[in-house]
Amino acid sequence: MRTYVTPEEHARIHRRRRRQALGLVMLVLLVIGIFTVLGAGYRLVAGLFDNTEQMEEYEDKLEGLVLFDPLPFEGIENIDDLTLREAAVWGCIYSIQETQGNFDNYAHDPTTEQLLLPAVEVDAYLARLVGPSFQLTHRSFDMDDMTIVFDEATQCYSIPVTGGVGYYRADVVKIFKEDGKLHVTVGYIPTSTQDDLISTQSDTPTKYMDYIFERTSGSWYLTGLTESATKPEQAASSQAANSVVMMDPEQLQDAIRSGVNPNADSSSSASSGAASSEAASSEAASSEAAASSEAASSAGSEAASTDAAA
């Protein structure tokens, strides 16, 4: 017997299927929404604790100063004038090399092929570092092995790009606030002595310094430099190594060749020494007892002889 579906029942089945399909789509969208919200929340929380971009920004700001290892100072007016000029010029050079990779977009002297660095870029670098109110009087200056010439006519510095400069590279390891000031802890990575403009021998800092920034007009500007509480790992390792008592090299080699534990040998030697001492003590005690017995026998014999004579 055939079962007939009425038009109303047929329409009800279709409506139920549409509701099921709609529910499935909504469920999928709900799952996608949940994962999207969780991902956004994770990125937001990670962003609150991840200051990588800020650290890279301060590395770019401080690279010029770190190159020449300035002495600690309080107040930008107390920094060495030559150090500040070196930092401003070579900080620009470093920034160009990092951002553009080359100096093709800058003019070069047709005779010496030296790079011509505009003074306005030096001013811009200093404005980001110490504030726009600071004004540097541009002029030529002498470095250890070269002279940086400033041309008043073109308002440019002539830079010998192939010359190796600087002693350290900057590696910002920590940023924190203290007493309303921003402290930027910078690791000093020694540079190589090759002809490359800025290259490093290793990625391990040999010392740390804290650069201090104060907030002015909504921005942080450099105002001081001081010793950092952070110390190089090498120094900590050296202290730990100095606290370890090393055994004599000859004893160590003998122990390695014989395949025994030198500490065990020492213990065995000590035990043997103790046993020998104990044996010697016992032998001495036995000798004393024998001597006493012999003396007593002699005394008894003399007494018997005296009685017989009487």
Image (cartoon, rainbow, N blue to C red):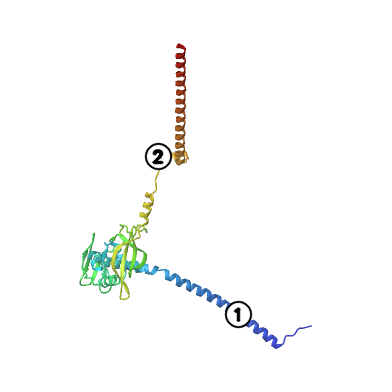
Q: Nearer the viewer, residue 242 or 154?
A: 242
Q: Which percent across, then down, holds residue 31?
A: 55, 75
Q: Which percent across, then down, holds residue 261?
A: 47, 41
| Vertical side of 280 occupied by 302: above or below | above
* Res 229 → quadrant: bottom left
175 vs 257, left or right, is left
Marks 2 & 1, CB-CB < 8 Å contact = no
What residue is shown with label 1?
Answer: 23
2 vs 148, left or right, is right
Q: Answer few, some or many: residues within 10 Å of disc 1's Cα (few below 14, many 20 plus, some between 14 and 19).
A: few
Q: Which mark is residue 250?
A: 2
The secondary element bearing badge 2 is classed as helix
Q: Nearer the viewer, residue 306 or 157?
A: 306
Q: Nearer the viewer, residue 216 or 155?
A: 216
Q: How many marks?
A: 2
Measuring 53% from the left and 75% from the top, which residue is drawn there?
34
